[in-house]
Image: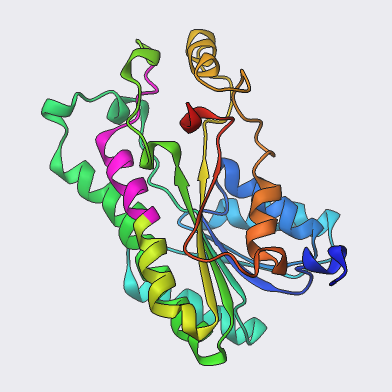
Amino acid sequence: MMNVEKLFNISNKVVILTGASGFLGQQYSEALSQKNVKIVLADINYQKCKKLEEQLNKKYSNETLSLKLDVGNKKSVQSMVSKTLKKFDQIDGLINNAVFPETVKERSIPLETFPLDILQKIISVNTIGSFLCSQEVGKIMAKKKNGVIVNISSIYGMVAADQRIYGKSGLNSSIGYALTKSSVINLTRYLSSYWGNKGIRVNTLTLGGVEYNQDPEFIKKYSEKTMIGRMAQKDEYVGALVFLLSDASSYMIGSNLIVDGGWTAW
């Protein structure tokens, strides 16, 4: 039997993380740095990536590369891949984590009047972005017959949002978020069936809600719908992510790993 520690070893792997400067992206960056991964911090907000890179470099010895990335723009994605290969000469993993940053105002728009232009922006980042990054990185992985892609989804890609828990919190989950997060799950399945014989493993990591100073009433109502009785802490998804990137999940492909405190298991 293989050494268990080696199963979870991802040291010196080159991993692209989109949406790296976001709330959860920063948690993933920290965890991967602890595992000595060579990380490409890719985000539309380049300055936040550089600041994050500086913070990581003070604490860890792994190599990092910050890149400005518009995931919905093919040329931007191609440039990211080219710069990654120039620096590291390989790509072992891709985490499609970028998500359109809906404002409180946008999340509060009723379905009946939800603007098409906002919906198209959400689709461009959440769905098309995941497709373009997978398409361009997958080409490289297919040539060497090895690689891992992790698509980040949400419980609202699996089940409908319970409108009753939001009230006037302004935290409503929009129709655009639901549409795109469900599409990511099936993107995983398609890519797996297409590239599975090329040594590329594609899986989805589906997340529940994370507590971060939301309205107390919302936190209470949300927590009551989980089996564990609370929302997730910001660092509770990194273990699942490392598992999916590592050889510990070598026989896992086309799957959806759900980490939601039991929200969808009722």
Tell me how the rendering is colored: rainbow
State which quadrant residue 241 falls in.
Answer: bottom right
| Residue reaching furthest to the top | 217
Instruction: Residue at 70%, 66% (x, y): give it.
Output: 246
| Residue reaching furthest to the left | 112
Which region is colored magenta? 169-185
Query: In the displayed structure, does residue 86 sit left or right of residue 131?
Result: right
| Residue reaching furthest to the front | 1
State which quadrant residue 169 falls in.
Answer: top left
Determine whether 119 is above or below 229 in the image.
Answer: below
For the residue pair 84 and 13, the one nearer the viewer reads as: 13
Query: In the displayed structure, does residue 48 sit left or right of residue 64?
Result: left
Instruction: Residue at 35%, 10% (x, y): give it.
Output: 167
For the residue pair 8 and 38, the one nearer the viewer reads as: 8
Confirm whether the magenta stretch covers residue 214.
no
State which quadrant residue 44 falls in.
Answer: bottom left
Determine whether 232 is above or below 134 in the image.
Answer: above
| Residue reaching furthest to the bottom | 143
Dominant secondary structure (helix, strand or loop) of the stretch shown in magenta = helix
Residue 145 seen in render: yes
How far across and how far down the image is residue 76, in percent?
39, 71
Instruction: Residue at 58%, 77% (x, y): give it.
Output: 147
How far across and how far down the image is residue 96, in percent?
48, 59
For the residue pair 208 and 40, the one nearer the viewer reads as: 208
How far across and how far down the image is residue 188, in percent?
42, 62
How far across and how far down the image is residue 50, in percent?
63, 58
Query: In the displayed structure, does residue 29 sit left or right of residue 57?
Result: left
Instruction: Residue at 72%, 58% (x, y): give it.
Output: 32
